[in-house]
Amino acid sequence: MTIRVIQYVYSGRRITHNFKCVLDFALQAFYNGLARRKVLLPVRKEFWMNALSTMLLIADAFVSLCDEMPLRKVSISDIVQRTGKNRKTFYYHFVNKDRLIIWIFRYDMGQVLKKHFSESVLLYEKPSEDSISHFPYYITQKSGVRSLDHAEFFECFAEVLEGRRHFYREALIDNGPYSLRNYLYNLYVAAIKRDIDIILSNRYLPQDNIDFLAEFYTCAFLYYFIRRCDQTSVEHLAANAGPFANIIHNSLEMEIKEAQLRRNL
């Protein structure tokens, strides 16, 4: 009943800006509450699908333009001209070009992860106004009480980069504070810290050590794939891993176990 009243008032033409802001806030709070309970209303689903269609149109136009000119030279004007939309539509969905690049990665990663894993192991961010919270970005796949097998995740990461290789090669050159490279570092440092907590399983490890392990292994896997992506002679980015595909989590488990043994001596 509440949502119908809000939608009815919202559809009226005579509405003040301040009242519209209040309604926006109320609607968002309502939908966020539903999202946390994994409830999706038909009207919300329709709105999301329409928005997704527009964002994909913008993303595809941007990627195609990057095949024609260097990524850094592609302007917002070029993108909106290619899509037939206007600048207002672009800025409604994306703050700037950096956020568009990040959105493309998160969409691509979400699609690949959903293809390879069941929903039960996928990891999402908390529901928010940011559309990327709809897309999984990582997994939690246990192979034991204190063991994780994420070998296939790293294969998925490679698959994402291979899918738009020229685009990601250029996007990952930038290492500024708002770049895709910096975003990936922050995203996966937090994910690896979560993995370390699972491996520790109530055992103690100083926070400085946890930070070091998370930062070290995140840098290792990101740099490896970024470098491989840039090598045109390399066809499959994860081809050489072989039996060491889960080396990060196997190493974490082994190092943490040895640290605990040394601590108990």
Image: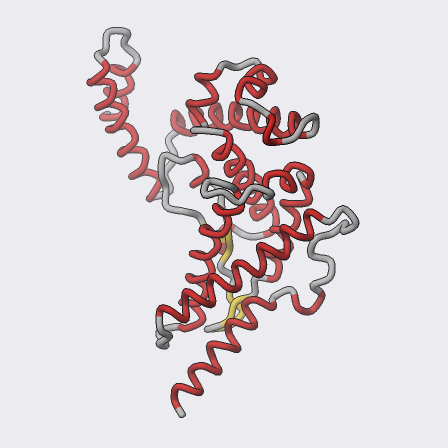
Q: Residue at x 40, y 92 (%)?
A: 265
Residue farthest top in this picture: 14
State the residue in front, 153 or 98: 98
How far from the left and from the top, in percent, is residue 212?
44, 67
Residue located at (46% from left, 18% from top) = 89
Q: Residue at x 70, y 53 (%)?
A: 237
Whether residue 45 sits left or right of residue 19 in the image: it is right
Vertical position of residue 159 compared to residue 87: above or below? below
In this rendered view, identify the residue nearer to me: 12 or 175.
175
Which residue occupies the foreground of this view, 47 or 138? 138
Q: Residue at x 44, y 48 (%)?
A: 124
Quadrant of the snapshot with the N terminus:
top left
**Snapshot quadrant of residue 211:** bottom left
Relative to 14, does residue 195 appear above or below in the rendering? Answer: below
Where is residue 111 drawn, in percent x and y?
Answer: 57, 42
Quarter of the image holding residue 29?
top left
Q: Report whether 61 appears left or right of 13.
A: right
What percent of the width, then of the height, locates residue 66?
65, 29
Q: Where is residue 137 shown, x and y percent of the image?
A: 50, 48
Q: Residue furthest right?
A: 233
